[in-house]
Image: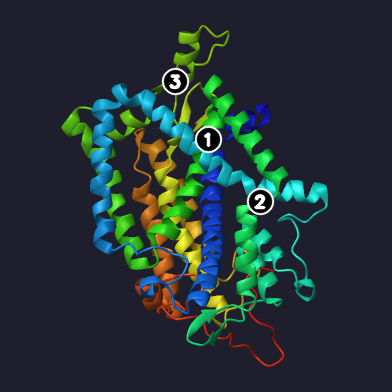
Amino acid sequence: MGAFEALAAVSPIGVCIGTAVATAAYAARRAQSVEMLLSLLEEEGDDSAGGSGEGGRPPGVGAPLSASAAIAFPFVASAALLFMFFFYAGVSALLAVVVTLSSAMALSFFIYPMVNTVVGRCAGRGWGGWVPPPAAAADPSEASRALLSGDASAAAVSATGATGSDRRRSGGSRTLDGSGAVAAASARCCAAPPPLPVVGTGAIVLTALGWWLMTGHWALNNLLGVSQCVLFVSLVRVHAAVTSLRVCTALLAGLFVYDVFWVFASAHLFGTNVMVAVATQDASNPVASAAAALHLPVAPVARLALPVKLVFPTGDGGGLMLGLGDIFVPGLLLGLVLAFDLTTAMAGAPRRRRGCWPADGIFPLALVGYAAGLVCSFVANGVWGVAQPALLYIVPATIGPVVVATASRGDLGELWRGPVVYGCSPGSRGELPAPATAAGDESVSVCE
């Protein structure tokens, strides 16, 4: 941690931007992995019931979020922000408990694939750390292991025994070769995961949370904040079903106005910057209160900076701050774009993808735009010397390249209307057609 502190002190802006971009990119990939796993599990249920999904919805997701609900979200967020502004002191201890519990769940979700891979490789048992070549993919459990390790595309390779997807129509339902076995293996693996990775994950989570509650260290605060971003993007992507650019644009546009208003205009109405005031307040540490009441020989910090922002110290004793909303809000768009890239590749689009981050897809453009928006926000902060609403720069920098790139390729209509869901061809609620490949060529590789 000392080396990380030294790096942050030398280049805090670079570390902050790099952390935010890496978090958003990883969150998009994890969301895609979770979406694929749920899709496979629902396929098995649909095939067993002879149906095609509840209410005709695409498998793997909940009810789609409407544009009106997306527009209403900033108003709900504004009400919550005002509540915290006026009543934070009275609810800070309760809020600390709630945030600690949610951070434990988020950190478990974040680190389990990594622990799973490390333990598997050390034990030589291949728990999520090794996917067999196509010829050796007879054991469908490898696909579920790849899914649990966060590699959705490698799981598709294991399930089909080939590079790419071999989805086909079968009796009016959407199936994937070997999906029944993969879903059953996934369910068994989720019900009884390997004990060592679970124990290792639990030990790391308890250690990190305990250290944070005792010291309130900024690096642990950032770790918990990053974990919450990753979990939030996955939950919203899968359960709220942000599956079209139209809904995602409505959500980002509303939060764009929300961010600008509460950073720039709130001082004129409330006498102070409400957004900054809420973000910089510390909460009462319930562990410190319990230790004092029980006369325990420990001295936890009395106040905690909750992981609702990333904080990086600077050499002059100050620090940089970036709200989690400036990471997970564009992360929703990145998750949508990555799903579109992978789904069009699986549908047999002529653009060939190489690697887990499709180099010729739209996702890299959106990711570069996100980084550029962050850079602009920090530049503006330095020029004017006041807190900046980062979404003012991030939203146009991410949506703009996506719209231009998809419009130039003729894909804007499909992405705009949706639904963009794993296993469904873009712009429809049907199953993916068989990949259209040239003679002698193999299927489009999703993740090689």
CA–CA distance between discs 2 and 3?
Answer: 33 Å
Asked whether, in this view, residue 3 is left or right of residue 398, the answer is right
Badge 1, how many Cα within 10 Å: few under 14, some, many 20+?
many
The reply to whether residue 247 is visible in this rendering is: yes
Q: Total marks drawn?
A: 3
Name the residue at the front extreme: 49
- Residue identified by numbered label 1: 222
Q: Are marks 1 and 3 in contact (CB under 8 Å)?
A: no
Name the residue at the right extreme: 124
Q: Percent from the top left, x then y, of residue 68?
A: 24, 61
Instruction: Of the two numbered discs 2 and 3 on the same chain, state the one appearing first in sequence.
Output: 2
- Residue identified by numbered label 3: 286
CA–CA distance between discs 1 and 3?
Answer: 20 Å
- Residue identified by numbered label 2: 193
Mark toward the viewer: 1 or 3: 3
Badge 3, how many Cα within 10 Å: few under 14, some, many 20+?
many
Q: Is residue 122 depicted above or below 409 in this figure? A: above
Secondary structure, mark 2, is loop
**Quarter holding the C terminus?**
bottom right
Q: Amino acid at mark 1?
A: Asn
Classify residue 149 by image quadrant: bottom right
Q: Is residue 232 depicted above or below 406 in this figure? A: above
Report the residue at 57% width, 83% height from top: 350
Mark toward the viewer: 2 or 1: 2
Instruction: Of the two numbered discs 1 and 3 on the same chain, state the one appearing first in sequence.
Output: 1
Q: Amino acid at mark 2?
A: Pro
Name the residue at the bottom extreme: 439
